[in-house]
Amino acid sequence: MEAEQIVKRMVDMYSEGRSTILPDLISYSMLLDAWSKSDEVGRGERAEAILDSIEERQISFDTSAYENPESTISATYVAAMRAVIRSGEDNIVERVEKIRQRAVKREELMKEMTESNLETNTHHMNSVMNSLIRVGRLSRATALLDKMEEHYRNGNYCMKPNVVSYSTLMNGWAKSTDPQKSTQTMIIFDRLKSMFLSGNQDAQPNFVSYVTLVDSIVKSGEENAAERAENIVRSMYEEYKSGKIPVKPNAQLVATVIDCWSKSGDNNAGERAEALLDWSIDIYQEDKDPKLRPIAFPFSSAITAWAKSRKFGKATHAKAILEKMKFLYKSGIIKSPPNIYCYTAVFNACAYTERDSLEKRDALKVFVDVYKEMINEDDVIPNHVTFVTVLTALRNLLAPDERRASAVGTVFEKCKEMGMCDFSVIKRLQSVVNPAQLKELVGDERVKENGDIDISLIPALWSCNVESMPKKRNRNLPRKGPAFQKKRR
């Protein structure tokens, strides 16, 4: 059953330290209810096995997160009974009676705990904290960590907070809508480090802790987010090298910070992103850990950071990063060659070079060189965004004369040939050439009297390879389909 596989993956990821989230009693209760309604063979036995898992982890003790804990626990056992009853398996009456007895015993134990104010252990408290966070009660979850720290300092080691305790709360703050979420996440992280330095070896920050902290900062949108995130990643590596912590950043974590610089709007973002990229290359060559090997994404992000800059020579800097990437790939240092996102980012840097004519001349040279290179690379496939950016560069870097019209014509023919001429390309084309030139490029019959192109008359073949752009895409993966196996000349 898919629901059970999801629960199992959550438990496995938690056990391996890759997640701070555990399934709670409600999750298991819903899973049991699903089994009770299932037609699968063996559903009764599976329900009993799930009930065993619940009791082994003592999840039913984690009651403070639920509005009606007695009802929640009761519903769990009832769902298990229902699954057995409907299973058609052997010894149904005896098995249901045993489940009923287990439910009675569990309720008696819970009542005993409540009346005697029996303390729970760290695992129980972490599970309760996770449940509180899942229902949006961050303040109660924070108060629970306060309680754990207080009990531990007073000598109650059964409730000693560990790294999961802090990472769970950090994750809750990081995913909240609170405007101070990155600050709150940092506060919890600092408490984690302080707890570890005080002698609690179970509170040593792990990789999940650092990733959660960096993620909360880069997504905060705060003015100094990139600076803060970079300091944390660099400090993390230095502490690892000095033996203070057993974990180090990986390539994806560094790439996240470089991307943050590219979106920061900081006037020095180009230099900072490129410097961090160079640092990531250096530490990979020093450490030789494959997990530190830079991928394509940080290169395109660093180029984008320069493209958004207002600094002199940004097109030249963008091309330099592209050349660096090609060299590293050919040298075997990295495994990712420049992809279309890298080339498009360079074109964008050229397109928005806005200073004097001398800089625009240099940007035009960069543009021409990189465009020719891209067209001659069989494994680099321009998309519709690339062609829009290329047309923008031609509009901004060339005077509105025959030279520009000729260049636009060449690019547009390539765009049609590759099936990448979508609505966005058509709209940009209209802004680059005059009406007469437009009619020559697309045909008189496709241009309306007002000078706009009639999209309905554009041949489907012109846009046959345009894909809708997903919000998230692995930039290292090639596009699929026969049209992309080899670039057409």
Image: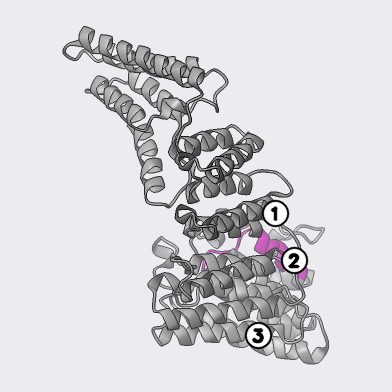
Between the C-alphas of marks 3 and 1, the distance is: 34 Å
Residue 79 vertical position relative to residue 398 in the rendered view, above or below: above
> Residue 285, percent across and down?
44, 83
Secondary structure of the residue carrying tag 3 is: helix
For residue 141, the mark is: none
Disc 3 and disc 2 in contact, CB within 8 angstroms: no
Secondary structure of the residue carrying tag 1 is: helix
Between the C-alphas of marks 3 and 2, the distance is: 30 Å
- Which residue is tagged 2? 430
Please tell me which of labels 3 and 2 falls first in the chain: 3
Left or right position of 84 against 439: left
Please tell me which of labels 3 and 1 falls first in the chain: 1
- Which residue is tagged 1? 183
Residue depth check, mark 3 versus mark 1: number of the one nearer the observer: 1
Q: Which residues are magenta?
A: 417-431
- Which residue is tagged 3? 317
Between the C-alphas of marks 2 and 1, the distance is: 47 Å
Instruction: State the residue lying farthest toward the left.
Output: 90
Instruction: State the residue lying farthest toward the top.
Output: 93
